[in-house]
């Protein structure tokens, strides 16, 4: 709580001999600022954060009033939000570790104690995104895959292991342990946090941000948490608030019960389809109504997991008796569970709620039927019984077959035709359109849910008993999201049956869900290429975008774990499993899905008898320790990272090198050049691509010069710990279009006044040599797409001081502010084209010499200048004076904290300066 407690909200709560402090929401009602029971639960939780952290600087009393003013017709206000913790996964976590390490190095260079750089709130990094399914189908698969994982990721993992020992508030869950959101659900999530502050014990709601889009899964236990970019996460770690628009909240009223045979996966696919139709992008979703108590907490978490696919920021459930039972089942401390109940009761946050919502949606659980989603959208649901029609229709739509199933001229295979393939071990198989080549029990969406995992095991057992097997061309895998899953599958005796069908454990990580499904056998890939086969995958994950699962697999289907096994057994997707046999027994008799589908009663007993709190207690007791490989990993130690100048993965970024203690402040930007003039909807992927790159591009050239061969380049995404690669990859997407160049696409720019066309990076270097500041101009929705902190970091490192756009995606705008780059906006109806500009002008931004105010109105003077080739006389480096265009822009700086970020050159710079100047 900030010093002043301006609302008199601090009160005490006694529990078991301890006096806790809490920020009491009811005072806001007494003040007449809101009616608490009309506010959605998620809004009350945000409100508590604002109320508790009000300090008059980062968070003001107006922010509290704004949050309390939430109504169905949501006011257009921004909130500074301070979560109680942060979770990270390894892909996005490495850049965060690199930044923290760089901050420590900067402190060390100033002869100060490096340990003053320390996350202010608990941070957990789970290493789960890098394991790939190279080996499968035998009991050694896990060991071999994890071995390869270490070989491929050693450098990155060393930096993470350094962080594990260097920071007190930074824990690491080593590889081979589990998946971030499942570990969060089963172990890290507290629902209510106890926190010590200035000698007082505080109780606060558990809230978090994570550097992964499926962070909202924690909403299954009533915790507010969502995915953010790295800069926001780092700022949150270091105690800075995250700004967000006060969200609209959609209430989904659940009623009825799930029918026999329908799973939580089927339910989430229905809800995802429904909420996509409703439109919940940038909104919160809360579930309420009588149907909520019909769902287990594991089922709720499956639904919350797919918030990004539904489009929402969060999709959360209330905390009720079932939540407390789940906390007990997962081995949480009994005393803590009591405290959760007491605290939430005191805040009016416990149990069923029926507040006001921006919009309400009704959903009847009894309408759920077994379903899949595909072929490339998670919200494109297909009832299982329609698959036999869906697939031929899809092939027809795609021009792969004609209406009668015959092959058109460009293809040689009709639907139903097969081609022979000899596998690496000499086995002869036949595959055709629709063949299932990957069948993966994967993803925290489902592996966190014992009922669907045990259902897969029971189906496998029944299949084995009926003499069924999975065809040899199907790549089968089981990647649990925690060690507990293996424990209960073993306890139930079902692991053997899954293994008999090839579903042995391949890793404890994301695997197929993130696209790490590993290679297919060469003869299979050759057959796909030769016959333009439309092969398929079936997985219990949450995303199935084109080429995500495997570049050679055209159609990908999301389904429950038992259906993943069922389609694996069938070996093809163009089958109606309600009518056609899934296979034949040893006597040649047909076996149908209903013959092997788990009995509801037996499944219920199995869940009850196989899953116990002791399993969770045992498996999570050593969650931060890792295996002998982690132990043996030779990582740097000490408080300051030992940077390796030869490394091509991890390098000290220049952000805090030669760091001045004095705040740089702001001043007019004079005689800037425009590096790029862009159109509308330039995405963060245009600005900072994540995929592979070639040796002809600046990033590739840099690596080649250091002896890295093109086949070892890896992707931009994997090199996010190396600013040299990342800044060379900024604005380097092959599809980006700099309209200063005539129709040329890719990362190119025109250096002025020379007029020479070169790469964006090369041009920026030449401008740096000339001490010329840079700007970029863009159309609407600048920086739309996924949150990617390197889009802003790269912008900064290229020397771009300001951007001017018609409008911004909020996260990119905030990330620019976080890097000290000034985001400016054209006036309504104006843009660089409308103003008659073409980017060749010399730009000055005026109005900053007197300091920067929130939402400042500034003037831009664009002076026509001619390139060297157009100069008729004089010094070719000096542009000839021409006509000027003056226009107004608004600084997209709407909080006092954001003003400080710009004045300091970025949020981390501000934090570092504060740390270094504190006595
Ligand atoms: S398993 Fe899938 S949803 Fe879960 S963290 Fe990994 S990639 Fe994300």
Image: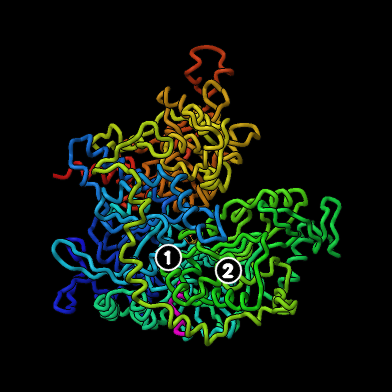
- Colouring scheme applied when the structure was drawn: rainbow
Q: What is the count of numbered marks?
A: 2
Asked if residue 169 is positioned above or below residue 443 in the image, the reply reads above
Question: Does residue 253 appear left or right of residue 353 in this picture?
Answer: right
Say which element carries label 1. loop
User: Can residue 277 be seen from the camera position used here?
Assistant: no
The magenta segment: 292-301
Is 293 covered by the magenta stretch?
yes
Q: Residue at x 13, y 63 (%)?
A: 199
Residue 246 placed where, x, y %?
40, 64
User: Can residue 391 be seen from the camera position used here?
Assistant: yes
Q: In which quarter of the image is the C terminus?
A: top left
Asked if residue 243 is positioned above or below residue 368 in the image, the reply reads above
Residue 55 placed where, x, y %?
22, 59
Asked if residue 715 is positioned above or below residue 239 in the image, the reply reads above
Q: Where does label 2 land, which residue?
A: 500
Say which element carries label 2. helix
Q: Can you tell which of label 1 and label 2 is closer to the viewer? A: 2
């Amino acid at each position: 709580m900030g010093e002043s407690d301006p609302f008199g909200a601090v009160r005490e709560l006694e529990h078991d001999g301890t006096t806790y402090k809490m920020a009491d929401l009811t005072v806001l009602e007494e003040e007449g600022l809101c009616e608490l029971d009309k506010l959605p639960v998620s809004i009350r939780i945000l409100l508590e954060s604002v109320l508790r952290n009000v300090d008059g600087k980062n968070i003001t009393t107006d922010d509290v009033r704004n949050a309390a003013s939430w109504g169905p017709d949501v006011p257009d206000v921004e909130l500074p939000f301070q979560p109680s913790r942060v979770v990270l996964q390894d892909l996005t976590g490495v850049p965060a570790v690199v930044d923290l390490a760089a901050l420590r190095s900067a402190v060390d260079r100033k002869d100060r104690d490096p340990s003053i750089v320390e996350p202010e709130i608990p941070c957990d990094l789970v290493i789960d995104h890098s394991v790939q399914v190279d080996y499968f189908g035998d009991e050694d698969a896990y060991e071999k895959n994890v071995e390869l994982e270490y070989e491929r990721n050693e450098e990155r993992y060393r930096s993470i292991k350094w962080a594990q020992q260097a920071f007190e508030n930074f824990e690491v869950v080593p590889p081979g342990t589990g998946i971030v959101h499942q570990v969060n659900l089963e172990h890290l999530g507290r629902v209510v946090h106890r926190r010590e502050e200035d000698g007082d014990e505080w109780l606060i709601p558990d809230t978090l941000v994570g550097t992964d889009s499926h962070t909202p899964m924690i909403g299954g236990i009533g915790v507010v948490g969502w995915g953010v970019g790295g800069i926001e996460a780092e700022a949150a770690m270091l105690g800075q608030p995250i700004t967000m628009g006060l969200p609209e909240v959609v209430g989904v009223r659940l009623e009825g019960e799930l029918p026999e045979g329908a799973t939580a996966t089927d339910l989430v696919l229905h809800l995802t389809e429904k909420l996509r139709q409703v439109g919940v992008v940038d909104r919160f979703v809360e579930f309420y109504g009588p149907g909520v108590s019909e769902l287990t907490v594991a089922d709720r978490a499956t639904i919350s997991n797919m918030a990004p696919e539904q489009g929402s920021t969060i999709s959360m459930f209330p905390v009720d008796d079932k939540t407390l039972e789940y906390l007990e089942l997962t081995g949480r401390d009994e005393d803590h569970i009591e405290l959760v109940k007491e605290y939430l009761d005191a805040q009016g946050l416990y149990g069923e709620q029926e507040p006001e919502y921006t919009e309400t949606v009704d959903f009847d659980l009894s309408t759920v039927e077994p379903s899949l989603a595909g072929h490339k959208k998670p919200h494109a649901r297909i009832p299982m019984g329609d698959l036999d029609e869906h697939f031929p229709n899809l092939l027809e739509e795609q021009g792969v077959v004609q209406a009668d199933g015959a092959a058109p001229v460009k293809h040689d295979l009709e639907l139903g035709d097969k081609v022979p393939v000899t596998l690496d071990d000499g086995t002869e198989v036949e595959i055709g359109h629709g063949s299932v080549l990957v069948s993966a029990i994967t993803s925290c969406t489902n592996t966190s849910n014992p009922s669907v995992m045990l259902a897969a095991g029971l189906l496998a057992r029944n299949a084995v008993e009926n003499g069924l097997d999975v065809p040899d061309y199907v790549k089968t895998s089981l990647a649990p999201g925690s060690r507990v899953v293996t424990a209960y599958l073993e306890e139930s005796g079902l692991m053997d049956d899954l293994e008999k069908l090839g579903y042995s454990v391949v890793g404890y990580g994301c695997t197929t869900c993130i696209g790490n499904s590993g290679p297919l056998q060469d003869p299979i890939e050759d057959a796909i290429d030769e016959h333009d086969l439309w092969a398929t995958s079936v997985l219990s994950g949450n995303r199935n975008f084109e080429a995500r699962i495997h570049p050679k697999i055209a159609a990908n289907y999301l389904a429950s774990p038992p259906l993943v096994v069922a389609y694996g057994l069938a070996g093809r997707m163009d089958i109606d499993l309600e009518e056609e046999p899934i296979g034949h027994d040893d006597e040649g008799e047909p076996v149908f899905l209903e013959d092997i589908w788990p009995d509801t009663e037996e499944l219920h007993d199995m869940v009850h008898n196989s899953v116990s709190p002791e399993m969770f207690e045992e498996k999570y007791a050593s969650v931060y320790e890792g295996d002998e490989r982690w132990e043996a990993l030779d990582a740097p130690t000490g408080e300051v990272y030992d940077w390796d100048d030869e490394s091509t993965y991890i390098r000290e970024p220049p952000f805090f090198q030669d760091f001045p203690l004095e705040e740089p402040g702001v001043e007019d930007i004079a005689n800037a050049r425009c590096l790029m003039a862009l159109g509308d909807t330039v995405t963060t992927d245009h600005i900072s691509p994540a995929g592979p790159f070639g040796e002809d591009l600046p990033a590739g050239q840099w690596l080649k010069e250091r002896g890295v061969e093109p086949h070892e380049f890896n992707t931009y995404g994997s090199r996010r710990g190396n600013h040299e690669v990342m800044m060379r990859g900024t604005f380097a997407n092959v599809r980006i279009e700099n309209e200063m160049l005539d129709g040329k696409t890719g990362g190119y720019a025109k250096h002025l006044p020379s007029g020479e066309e070169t790469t964006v990076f090369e041009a920026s270097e030449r401008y740096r040599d000339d001490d010329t500041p840079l700007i970029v101009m863009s159309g609407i929705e600048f920086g739309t797409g996924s949150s990617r902190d390197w889009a802003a970091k790269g912008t900064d490192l290229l020397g771009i001081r300001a951007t001017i756009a018609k409008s911004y995606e909020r996260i990119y705008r905030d990330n620019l502010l976080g890097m000290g780059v000034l985001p400016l906006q054209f006036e309504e109806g104006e843009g660089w084209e409308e103003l008659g500009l073409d980017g060749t002008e010399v730009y000055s931004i005026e109005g900053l010499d007197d300091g920067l105010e929130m939402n400042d109105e500034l003037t831009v003077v664009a002076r026509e200048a001619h390139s060297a080739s157009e100069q008729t006389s004089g010094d070719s480096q000096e542009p000839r004076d021409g006509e000027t265009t003056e226009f107004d822009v608004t600084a997209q700086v709407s909080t006092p904290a954001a003003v400080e970020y710009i004045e300091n050159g970025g949020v981390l710079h501000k934090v570092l300066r504060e740390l270094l100047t504190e006595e």
